[in-house]
Image: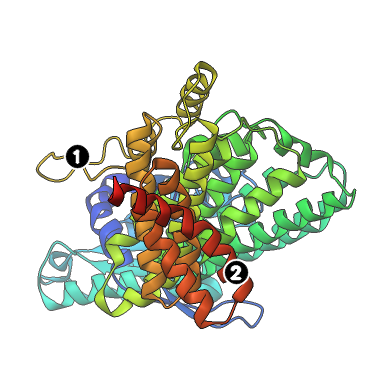
């Protein structure tokens, strides 16, 4: 469930309850201009809030520490139609409400007077001073625009509809004024917290949650680009701390990220927040792999919301390589093969996520970024094949079988296990099912290894990176030779030899010929026999 800023309601709660559903639905339907502070450009945003009954105890929370889940705006609702009734009771109730707000220094409020057309009919004389006038005089002061009337919105006549739209427009505007005020205080506190980062008591995890809340606020306002900036800043800040630690400047909190990684779950690119990992960050018990997965997943979610899937692909390889570097710098202990599993799962997850965005007009852009991911997944699968005794010519030992079992356990639960089509048919093989199947037997491993290799080669060829394709072909030739399939190996070696001769890399050509002749001799033996 989304955490939204809260708007309180007081006065006639039964009256407001009848209007609440309409307000919650209508407020985000139209954008409102957000005039920002510090010279930043105005943006058009959509406002989403939750309404809760007013209570004085909800006013004591620290506005500078959090925005979501706490009140930033307060409303009072009444349908008092008689000036005398207003003087006798409504004014006192309003006064008590306004006083409680002022005692907390709160200036973001709104009073709504509901008027029914029936009260204007008949032979009654029109009073010189209306209830709305009295409310404005008693409480409006220099902010009389905070006191508004609403003609019965249950009516469908033009006047009622216009009154409803006026209320929505006014409420959106005042909400953004309140938003801006709360955000300014929040950002000032966040900057002050960031300046404390050299102090021993400072914690990156606590600061991360603080700035992440700002990102969530921007996301609620549909400012996905600005939400992404917050995560990118956190990414850069953490990276800088890790790099500084390599030079000997290691803060105390960074040691928490040096704990052994007993799980190597791959990426799960979902738009939803991972509450479990967020809780681990809050308790400062998150591993480096878990944290890096979480942060990249949030960045990807925002890129997808901006319809920038290829930027996800372009960032993915850098993310994988940088995380490996950080694991090395922080000397994080991971079981052999764990990082390779994580790499394969993460690459396949990114590639699968891009399929929903694939269009003919963007195929080339897609291939330029996915080709290295296919190759990376193939390299890591090859690493796992050597470790687990699944490569040609190897016999799997009992210790290697135990290695496979421990690697599979370390992958955790399949995050896509409950993904189904409308016909209740399982979605295509998930990254985890593919990797588990590849590790199940040499035959299954061969199938998946060749599939990844062929896709990587064809994708590299499609974007014109022939040398990269030939390099993978060389490793495939070695694989086929170990399998005893000399003819298939010769095909790849011949392609490589042709390229070396065309580019006049004579030494490499001669080296390739040394590998090429044995399979040709084998072929001749086969023919003569």
Residue under label 1: 426
411 in relation to 192, above or below = above
Q: Residue at x 48, y 63 (%)?
A: 372
Q: Is residue 210 left or right of residue 311?
A: right
Q: Do we see residue 63 in this rendering?
A: no
Which numbered circle lies on residue 354? none
Residue 70 rendering spot, x and y as whole percentages: 52, 48
Q: Could you classify mark 2 by the number of other residues whose Cα lies within 10 Å: few (under 14), some (14-19), or many (20 or more)?
A: some
Q: In what element is the residue under mark 2?
A: helix
Q: Find the residue positioned furthest to the front.
A: 528
Secondary structure beneath dot 1 equals loop
Residue bearing mark 2: 508
Q: Earlier in the sequence, mark 1 or mark 2?
A: 1
Which of these two is toward me, 21 or 183?
183
Q: Residues within 10 Å of mark 1 (few under 14, many from 20)?
A: some
| Residue depicted at x 51% and y 50% | 379
Image coordinates for residue 105, horizontal then vertical, percent: 64, 57
Q: Please tell me in which quadrant of the rendered image residue 453 appears.
A: bottom left
Q: Position of residue 75 (x, y in %)?
A: 42, 57
**Which residue sits at x=17%, y=77%?**
159
Above or below 496: residue 485: above
Q: Name the one closer to the observer, 421 or 512.
A: 512
């Amino acid at each position: 469930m989304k955490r939204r800023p809260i708007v309180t309601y007081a006065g006639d709660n039964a009256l407001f309850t009848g209007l609440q559903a309409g307000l919650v639905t209508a407020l985000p339907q139209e954008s409102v201009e957000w005039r920002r502070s510090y010279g930043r450009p105005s943006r058009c945003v959509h406002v989403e809030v939750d309404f809760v009954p007013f209570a004085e105890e909800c006013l004591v929370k620290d506005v500078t520490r959090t925005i979501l889940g706490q009140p930033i705006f307060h409303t009072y609702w009444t349908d008092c139609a008689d000036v005398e009734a207003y003087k006798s009771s409504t004014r006192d109730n309003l006064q008590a409400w306004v006083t409680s707000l002022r005692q907390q220094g709160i200036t973001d409020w709104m009073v709504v007077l509901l008027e029914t057309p029936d009260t204007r009919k008949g032979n009654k004389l029109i009073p010189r001073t209306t209830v709305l006038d009295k409310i404005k005089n008693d409480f409006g002061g220099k902010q009389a625009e905070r006191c508004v009337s609403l003609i019965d919105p249950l009516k469908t006549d033009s006047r009622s509809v216009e009154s409803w739209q006026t209320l929505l427009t006014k409420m959106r505007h005042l909400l953004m004024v309140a938003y801006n005020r709360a955000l300014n205080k929040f950002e000032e506190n966040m900057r002050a917290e960031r300046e404390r980062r050299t102090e021993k008591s400072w914690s990156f995890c606590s600061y991360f949650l603080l700035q992440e809340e700002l990102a969530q606020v921007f996301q609620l306002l549909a400012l996905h680009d600005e939400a992404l900036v917050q995560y990118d800043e956190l990414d850069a800040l953490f990276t800088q701390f890790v790099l500084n630690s390599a030079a000997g400047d290691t803060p105390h909190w960074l040691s928490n990220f040096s704990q052994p990684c007993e799980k190597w779950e791959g990426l799960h690119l979902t738009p939803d927040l991972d509450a479990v990992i967020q809780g681990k960050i809050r308790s400062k018990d998150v591993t480096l792999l878990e944290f890096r997965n979480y942060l990249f997943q949030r960045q990807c979610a925002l890129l997808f919301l901006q319809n920038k899937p290829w930027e996800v692909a372009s960032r993915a390889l850098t993310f994988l390589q940088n995380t490996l570097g950080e694991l090395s710098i922080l000397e994080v202990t991971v079981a052999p093969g764990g990082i390779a599993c994580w790499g394969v799962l993460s690459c396949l997850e990114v590639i699968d996520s891009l399929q929903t965005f694939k269009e003919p007009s963007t195929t080339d852009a897609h291939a330029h970024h996915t080709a290295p991911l296919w190759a990376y997944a193939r390299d890591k699968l090859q690493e796992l094949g050597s470790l687990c005794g699944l490569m040609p010519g190897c016999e799997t030992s009992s210790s290697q079988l135990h290695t496979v079992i421990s690697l599979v356990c370390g992958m955790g639960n399949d995050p896509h296990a409950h993904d189904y089509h409308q016909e209740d048919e399982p979605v295509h093989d998930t990254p985890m099912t593919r990797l588990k199947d590849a590790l199940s037997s040499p035959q299954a491993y061969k199938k998946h290894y060749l599939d990844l290799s062929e896709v990587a080669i064809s994708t590299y060829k499609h974007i014109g990176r022939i040398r990269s394709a030939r390099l993978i072909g060389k490793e495939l030739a070695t694989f086929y030779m170990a399998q005893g399939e000399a003819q298939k190996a010769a095909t790849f070696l011949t392609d490589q030899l042709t390229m070396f001769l065309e580019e006049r890399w004579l030494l490499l050509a001669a080296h390739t010929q040394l590998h090429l002749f044995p399979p040709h001799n084998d072929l001749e033996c086969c023919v003569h026999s």
